[in-house]
Every structure is written in C-alpha cells, then in structure tokens.
Image: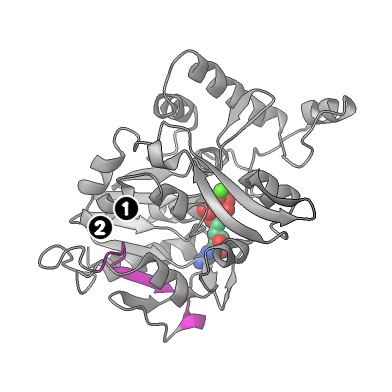
Amino acid sequence: MKITALAGGIGGSRFLLGARAALPDAEITVIGNTGDDITLHGLRICPDLDTVMYTLGGGISTERGWGRHAETFTVADELAAYGVGPAWFGLGDRDLATHLVRTQMLAAGYSLTDVTAALCQRWKPGLRLLPMSDDRVETHVVIETDEGRRAVHFQEWWLRMRAATPAREIISVGAEKARPAPGVLDALANADLVLLPPSNPVVSIGSILAVPGLRDALIGTPAPVVGVSPIISGAPVRGMADACLRAISVATTAGAVGAHYGGRGHGAAAGGAGAGAGAGGGILDGWLVDTADTGTEVPGVTVKARPLLMTDVEATVEIVRAALELAGV
Ligand code: GDP
Ligand code: CA
C-alpha cells in the first residue's frame, strides 16, 4: 500500500511513528513543511524536516520533542558570549552538523530534495521524506506593536514571543512562485491513502497547501483523504495552534478545523473517487476527532471519534488504524 502524508514537526512525526509501526509493509511518502525554515549564522535550517528525520531515525530528544538526543550547546554559548544572537533559537552542537551539511550541499547546487535524501541516508527514517518545495517559502507573521505594524519571521513570533503578540496575518512568503518539489504531486496522485496528521492546520498543513498545485492534487487524488484533529476539547494538545487559528479567523475546535479543511464532496470516505469529485472544494473525506469531541459534524466529511492522544506508539498505531478504517482501505 502507498501512503502519502503531509507533515509539520512534532505532531507530524509522532503520528508517522505510529503509521510506520502500524503499516510495516507500506510505502510511506511524507511531504514535509518547509515554511518554518530559517537562515541563521549563514546556515539553512529546516526544523520540520529535521524533526521528522530525527524522530523516525531515532536521533530526536524525546524530552524536548525537537533537536538531537544528548545534545550540548557549546557553540550557542560561545555565540552568546560574543553577544551574537538570536538567543531564542535553540541551536545544538550535534544539530549544527546537519545544518552545515545542508548549507554546504545547497551552496554546491544540490536541491533541498537531494539534500534531504542525503541526510536521510544516515538516519534511515523508513519512509521517503520530501520537502514540499525546493523553492524558498518562509512563513512570516504580521504583528502590531507600539511602533506599528511589522512582519517577523514565524520562528521569532513562535519562539521569542511565544505567539503571545496577536498575529494580524500569517503569510507564506514566496509561496505563490514556489513549485512542488519533484515527486510531490506524483505521491499524491498515486497514493492508496492520503493522511493529514494532527499537525498545525495553519503553519504546517496550511503552508504546504499554499504551494500552488498542492491543494488541487489533494482535491483530485483518487485516494481517500483522512485527517486527524490536532485540537481536542477546544485546545491544541501542545503548542500555540490556537494563536495561528485566530489569525485566520478559525475557531479552535475540532469541528471548525475540519470545516476549514473542508469536504471534497466525494460522499463517504470509502470509495471516494467518482461522480462529483472535488465538488466540495475541500480536501477531506474523513476527519478523526477525539472522543471528547464526539458529536462533531463537518458538512461533506465523515467524522469519527476516537481517542487521539499520541501518548505512545501503541496509542498512535490505534489512531492510524482508525484512519485506515475510516478510509475503507
Ligand atoms: P510542529 O511543527 O513541531 O509545531 O508540529 P506539527 O505542526 O506537526 O504539530 C503540532 C500540532 O500537534 C499541535 O497543534 C498539537 O495540538 C498537535 N499534537 C501534539 N500532540 C498531539 C497528540 O497527542 N494528539 C493530537 N491529536 N494532536 C497532537
Ligand atoms: Ca513546525
């Protein structure tokens, strides 16, 4: 079975651990968010791709959920001693090696797709990890301060401001000119099942959908598309997705996020292709919500309630099985 999943960082990777365990024989392709990418100290950093790679490759810090296990921060301390920031971005010594390799390869003319494949040769994540695009797309956040309106990089808003300064607008800079990376559209067109893990609907899944052609590929795929809600009982399980949803005027509920993705208008999740394909203009056939949100309805989408806390791999395997059942594959 061919499975294609869109993914951000922590929520996406935890879900993928469950998908890999539930479907050891499946060919899993991950379309990773690169909207979080940032250049610091001349180094190109791809936090979400790295979180997927480290998590699936066994190199993640399980306590933090991002960055390397057994990490040290000597270089960051030395930079701070020079008064060189930003102090709000955690750059570990082991992690720096990844960014050095990536930056060197990009400077030599390799694409981000090539670089990601090369880095994955070391980590062997057990799935194919593709960046959403080889072109540069960066999420910026428009905020209002005493000095007026200005845009900051998503990482500055998220990490330094802890998303506490209200976002007026969230913009994918460069998205309109970006092309899907090689293999991305094929992975959606030729999948047996497409999964949307419980990643941030705005700055993870939303950034991926901002790449021209991606949304249409989801609308048009003959495979069923099933999503998992990152919102349980009106709050994100982890992080500040509510601050992102507020910026796009979507309520922080499982139902509102499902409706924001929208139904494809294929009817029931199972047997998706056929008459009226894409008539709904949305991207979902099925939507999994937590049992705390039982009774949630999303027009044009089959909704099922299951426990959605990814407490460990076993619990996540059950979520993946529920998605398979909902998809009828
Ligand atoms: P990021 O890039 O590291 O922020 O990670 P993602 O975008 O992939 O995922 C972030 C989302 O994961 C957050 O909005 C959380 O609500 C969601 N999340 C984290 N843990 C869980 C969980 O155990 N269950 C569910 N349903 N969602 C989760
Ligand atoms: Ca992210």
Q: Secondary structure at mark 2?
A: helix
Q: Quadrant of the C terminus?
A: bottom left
- Residue in the image at 10% along x and 67% along y: 275
**Which residue lies most toward the top here?**
108
Q: Residue 219's mark?
A: 2
Query: Which dot marks residue 254?
Result: none
Residue 87 in sight here? yes
Name the residue that disc number 1 marks.
215
Question: How many circles with numbers are drawn on the protein?
Answer: 2
Q: Are marks 2 and 1 in contact (CB under 8 Å)?
A: yes
Q: Which residues are magenta?
A: 280-293
Question: Where ligand 1 lies, by quadrant?
Answer: bottom right
Residue drawn where x is 64% and y is 61% of the image: 240
Above or below, comparing residue 181 to residue 251 in the picture? above
Say above or below: 136 vs 115.
Answer: below
Measured as percent of width and height from the top left, residue 312 is found at: 54, 60
Residue situated furthest right in the rendering: 81
Q: Who is closer to the viewer here, 123 or 298?
A: 298
Q: Amino acid at mark 1?
A: Arg
User: How would you rate the neighbour count of disc 1 (Cα within 10 Å): few for under 14, some for 14-19, many for 20 or more?
Assistant: some
The residue lying toward the viewer, choosing from 170 and 31, is 170
The residue depicted at 31 percent of the width and 64 percent of the height is 282
- Toward the left, the furthest residue is 275
Furthest residue to the front?
A: 148
Give the spatial CA distance, label 2 vs label 1: 6 Å
Asked if the magenta segment contains residue 160, the reply would be no
